[in-house]
Image (cartoon, rainbow, N blue to C red):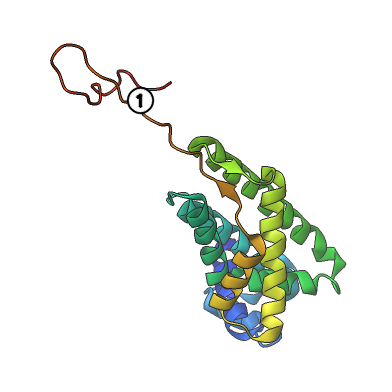
C-alpha cells in the first residue's frame, strides 16, 4: 500500500504540482482511503518529499546501469547526464528541497537522500574506474559529489529559465568537462620467427609485452 501511494502521488505531483493535488485525489488514484495516507505519511507535504526522494534515487540507479554499458569515459559521462537530465526526477527533488525551507521537520529525509546519491555515485564510479582501468581526473569522491551538485544546480536554474532537457544536459556536460581518461592500449611486439618463416606476429599469447 505504501508503494502504491508513493507511485500515485509521484505521478500526480509531477503532473499538477503540490498545491493542486489533494489527499483525496491521491487516495483515489491508489485505490486507497485518505486515512491511509495520513497513517503512513502524516501530511501531504511529507508524502511529496518522500516521493521525490524515492524518484531521484531510482533515476540515479537507472542512470548508473545505463552508463555502465558504455565503452569510453566520455560516453559514460554523457550517458549518465542524458539519463539524469532526461527524467523529471531531479526537478521533482529540487522542489522537495525547496519545500524543506519551510518544513524543517522534513529536511532529514532530503539530507539522507543527498548523502545516498553521493555515496552510491561514488561506489558506482569507483567500480567503473577500477574495472575498466580508466583514470579519474579528480578523486572519485570529488567526482561523485560534483556530479550531483552540478545536476541539482543546473536543474534549479534551468527550471527557472524554462530550459529544455536537452539544454540542461548540454550545460551540465559543459560544466563537468572530461571526467576520466582511458588507459592507452598496450603495444604489441612484432617479432621475427626463426627459420624460413616470414616476419609476423607470434601466435596469440606468445611474445606479447607484459
Q: Residues within 10 Å of mark 1 (few under 14, many from 20)?
A: few
Quarter-of-image position of residue 48: bottom right
Answer whether residue 39 is visible to the viewer in this image.
Answer: no
- The C terminus - image quarter: top left
The residue under the point 48% across, 39% down is 184
Q: Which residue is mark 1?
A: 189
Task: Tell me if 207 is positioned left or right of 104 in this view.
Answer: left
Q: Is residue 121 visible?
A: yes
- Which residue is painted at 66% across and 57% down in the image? 147
- 2 and 195: which one is in front? 195
Q: Position of residue 190 (x, y in %)?
A: 31, 25
Q: Give the left or right position of residue 204, taking residue 82 as reference.
A: left
Q: Nearer the viewer, residue 162 or 89?
A: 162
Image quarter where the N terminus lies is bottom right
Is residue 41 positioned above or below 164 on the image? above
**Image position, residue 203 (x, y; %):** 23, 22
Say what secondary structure mark 1 lies in: loop
Give the x, y percent position of residue 113.
Answer: 71, 56
Q: Position of residue 201 (x, y in %)?
A: 25, 25
Tell me how many marks there are: 1
User: Residue drawn 73% across and 52% down?
Assistant: 115
Q: Nearer the viewer, residue 35 or 29?
A: 29
Q: Residue at x 62, y 59 (%)?
A: 177
Amino acid at each position: 500500500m505504501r508503494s502504491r501511494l508513493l507511485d500515485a502521488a509521484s505521478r500526480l505531483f509531477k503532473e499538477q504540482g503540490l498545491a493542486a493535488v489533494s489527499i483525496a485525489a491521491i487516495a483515489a488514484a491508489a485505490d486507497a482511503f485518505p486515512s491511509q495516507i495520513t497513517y503512513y505519511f502524516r501530511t501531504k507535504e511529507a508524502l511529496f518529499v518522500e516521493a521525490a526522494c524515492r524518484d531521484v534515487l531510482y533515476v540515479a540507479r537507472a542512470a548508473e546501469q545505463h552508463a555502465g554499458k558504455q565503452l569510453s569515459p566520455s560516453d559514460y559521462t554523457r550517458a549518465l547526464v542524458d539519463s539524469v537530465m532526461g527524467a523529471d526526477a531531479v526537478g521533482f527533488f529540487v522542489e522537495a528541497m525547496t519545500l524543506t525551507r519551510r518544513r524543517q521537520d522534513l529536511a532529514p529525509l532530503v539530507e539522507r537522500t543527498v548523502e545516498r546519491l553521493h555515496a552510491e555515485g561514488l561506489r558506482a564510479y569507483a567500480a567503473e574506474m577500477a574495472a575498466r582501468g580508466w583514470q579519474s581526473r579528480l578523486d572519485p569522491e570529488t567526482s561523485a559529489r560534483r556530479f550531483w551538485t552540478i545536476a541539482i544546480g543546473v536543474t534549479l536554474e534551468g527550471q527557472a529559465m524554462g530550459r529544455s532537457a536537452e539544454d540542461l544536459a548540454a550545460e551540465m556536460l559543459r560544466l563537468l568537462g572530461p571526467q576520466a581518461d582511458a588507459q592507452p592500449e598496450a603495444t604489441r611486439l612484432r617479432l621475427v620467427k626463426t627459420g624460413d618463416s616470414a616476419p609476423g606476429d607470434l601466435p596469440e599469447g606468445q611474445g606479447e609485452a607484459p
